[in-house]
Image: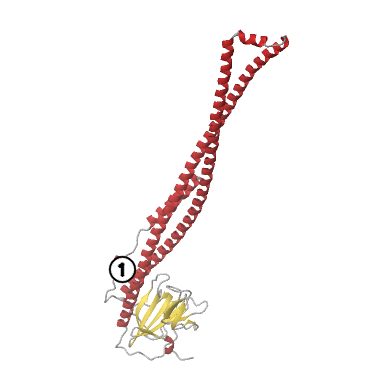
Amino acid sequence: MSAKSILKKTAAVLCAFAVWTACLTYLPNSANLLTVSAGKSLSELEAEKKQLADEKKQVKNKLAELEKSAEEQEQYQAYYAEQIEIQEKELDIVNAQADELEAQISDLNDRITQQKEDIDKSISMFRDRLRAMYIAGDASYASVIAGSSDFYEMLARMEMVKRMSVRDKEMIDDLNKQLDTYNTDCETLNTRLDEQKQTISEQETLLAELQDSYNNSVEVLEMINKEAEDYAARSEEIDAEEEKVEAALQAEIKRLASQEKVFIGSDFTWPAPQVHNLSDGYGWRDLFGKQQFHKGVDITKPGCAGKDIVAAQAGTVILAQKTYTPGYSYGKYVIIDHGGGYTTLYGHCSEVYVSVGQTVTKGQKIAAIGNTGNSYGAHLHFEVRINGQHTDPMKFYKKQ
């Protein structure tokens, strides 16, 4: 991968981080916690529950975003670590190549030095012979002639002297040509060495950029993890606050449940006359690997959505929740006070047909089966409470 593409990748990461940072417009903290006040109405408490549900959903979504961002940063770090390892190996190779070039240049420089010495020595010897011949003048030739036994030997000696002179010149010319070759080779190697050093510089710059990108990703991941810790802490705060609101809500329901009125009988009519199957009973259950206490019973069958929900007993509607937060609480639901501290709750409705303060008769249609709130399929969640305390609804029905 080229340096240019790596830089583009790095810029994209940093740009994504900048966008991610800009998106963190609000982090709830303890200062934003709702304070549950005594004496709040059911509608006010429900509003608080909805606000907490909305806030919890925001926190959950943000935690999911942070988790995804953390995974991306871990992938970036793995990518940069791999690129850094490759880059270090490439840098080792170009450094080794540079070392080899420097060794070749050093050897060639030694040859050039020796060649210059050989040339200087040959030229010096040639000059000495020329100087001697010049000083001797014609005497040298006379000596050659005088030492000859005949005319032909004299010519041969004169030719030998001439050839020696030519040979000296040729030898010097060859040495100069070789020197020129050495110098040219040396220049070529020096040019290659300069290019290699430039490559090394570029490789070192690229390695530094990769290391910076890796370090930046580490810092980003640390920031993400810190942000996730803050949101996780806020999620725990919301859970605690929800428990307070739920307790206040149940206390208000208990307060509103009429103690003066006598509870009419112990037998209830079945709250879903068209559906008789129980999918989940009252008591402890394992839900998604976690033990939870189910405060009522779930009534369902295939195609039950929209089927009638009726009042299990005559009474007064004290809560009719007609809006809901997806994935939270009972969704749309109704609570009816039957006197004597007895109340019934009908949860996850698709529609609610009654209003707070309305008197209903036993068997009167009050809602329709739905899948609202914290629900995983259409069903009726039915509870019976006595003085605010949940109890098994099935004990209010005959065994058959």
Residue 298 place in picture, x, y as percent: 46, 80
Query: Relative to the observer, which residue lies in front, 396 or 145?
Result: 145
Q: Amino acid at mark 1?
A: Leu
Residue at the image point whose x is 34% and y is 62% from the top: 27
Query: Relative to the observer, which residue lies in front, 338 or 230?
Result: 230
Quarter assignment of residue 227: bottom left
- SS at badge 1: loop
Residue 305 place in picture, x, y as percent: 48, 76
Describe residue 136's horizontal placement relative to residue 332 as left or right.
right
Q: State whether residue 99 appears in this view.
A: yes
Describe residue 141's horizontal placement relative to residue 241 as left or right.
right
Residue at the image point whose x is 53% and y is 35% from the top: 106
Please tell me whether residue 94 is drawn above or below residue 344 in the rendered image: above
Residue at the image point whose x is 37% and y is 86% from the top: 314
Image color mode: secondary structure
Describe residue 173's horizontal placement relative to residue 372 as left or right.
right
Query: Relative to the observer, which residue lies in front, 135 or 40?
Result: 135
Query: Relative to the observer, which residue lies in front, 393 or 12?
Result: 12
Count residues near mark 1 (Cα–Cα under 10 Å), then give few for <14, some for 14-19, many for 20+.
Answer: few
Quarter assignment of residue 118: top right
Describe residue 125's horizontal placement relative to residue 283 as left or right.
right
Residue 287 place in picture, x, y as percent: 46, 77
Residue at the image point whose x is 36% and y is 82% from the top: 336
Q: State whether residue 1 appears in this view.
A: no
Residue identified by numbered label 1: 33
